[in-house]
Amino acid sequence: MATVSDRVRNATTKQDIREVTTHFEGDKGILEVQTLNAWYGKTLAIKDISMSIRSRTITAIIGPSGCGKSTFIRCLNRMHEVSHGGRVSGSVLLDGKDIYARDVDPVTIRQRIGMVFQKPSPFPTMSIFDNVAAGLRLTRLWSRRGDLQEVVERSLRQAALWDEVKDKLNQSGASLSGGQQQRLCIARALAVAPEIILLDEPCSALDPAATLKIEDLMRNLAQEYTIVIVTHNMQQAARVSEWTAFFLLGEMIEYGKTVDIFSRPKDKRTEDYITGRFG
Ligand code: ADP
């Protein structure tokens, strides 16, 4: 197998070299957000957000209800434009390429940047197996039935659900507990081999035990994937994330290492929020 230096030697342009080294060093899944604005019709919901989201880390987006957290992460995989009146300006570079460029297919972006929602949402009429396989079947990322079974098992293992469901893969996804359903949705997102996983309040409908399981899972997944989580739960942000961005009224007020945001915030508004003076 070619080594990194072989591949670099054979590369002909600077861009090729960058692609080779990026690929081999596993430094994929970097998001660079540049002056991002998002509207619903005439209403500006997020304003001039610029930030770099690092590869293989967990970045938390915190802030009071209605401050634009969900809108922001939905802009990161081109889901916002599906909302009524949804419009965006600015750019989001995924590994250096703007996901909003004219020649980019939003469906491919949503495969590379997966999303898990607040309410566990397995397809209710589908079996556990088919829930995980659904995205794969749509994207035709599999060729043989054998491949499909392998990917479903791997995804369920990665989502720490395999042992609990391996004997009942034909049962409905809706037969699982809330926490299991959420891990099933994570398995479904993982099956199409994303680089980034966006989680929008993934634990808000779960009990504390199921929440801790999802948090453990996130920590494991961050060894391989870039994770962005929206949470209104500050303890959760402090427990799982390495980086935190605080949003207020559609603006990003402060962004930094989670330990700094929670122990020595620079902005008075961040301090007021994390100390519970509002929110
Ligand atoms: P958060 O996730 O922080 O609670 P949101 O991103 O959901 O905030 O909302 C940001 C702003 O955008 C709010 O003022 C909200 O009312 C508005 N908004 C959210 N979704 C829609 C929508 N589908 N249509 C119109 N306005 C919306």
Image (spheres, rainbow, N blue to C red):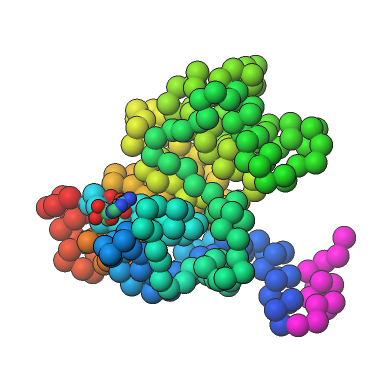
Looking at the image, residue 219 sits to the left or right of residue 23; the answer is: left
Q: Position of residue 31 (x, y in %)?
A: 51, 65
Q: Please give the name of the residue rendered at 39% of the width and 28% of the height, measured from the top-left corner.
A: 209
Q: Please give the name of the residue rendered at 75% of the width and 42% of the height, measured from the top-left corner.
A: 142
Q: Position of residue 200 (x, y in %)?
A: 40, 46
Q: Nearer the viewer, residue 81 or 154?
A: 81
**Outermost residue toward the right?**
1
Residue 271 in view (yes/no): yes
Q: Nearer the viewer, residue 9 or 184?
A: 184
Q: Is residue 8 magenta?
A: yes
Q: Position of residue 263 (x, y in %)?
A: 26, 59
Q: Please give the name of the residue rendered at 32% of the width and 59% of the height, measured from the top-left corner.
A: 40
Residue 257 in view (yes/no): no
Looking at the image, residue 57 sits to the left or right of residue 118; the answer is: right
Q: Nearer the viewer, residue 226 or 187?
A: 187
Looking at the image, residue 150 sits to the left or right of residue 191; the answer is: right
Q: Position of residue 171 (x, y in %)?
A: 59, 17
Tell me which corner region of the image, top left, top right, bottom left or bottom right, holds residue 10: bottom right
Q: Note whether 50 is above or below 154 in the view shown.
A: below
Quarter of the image for the N terminus: give it.
bottom right
Q: Which residues are magenta?
A: 1-13
**Outermost residue toward the left?**
277
Q: Nearer the viewer, residue 150 or 219?
A: 150
Q: Is residue 252 magenta?
A: no
Q: How many marks?
A: 0
Tell me which corner region of the image, top left, top right, bottom left or bottom right, holds residue 201: top left
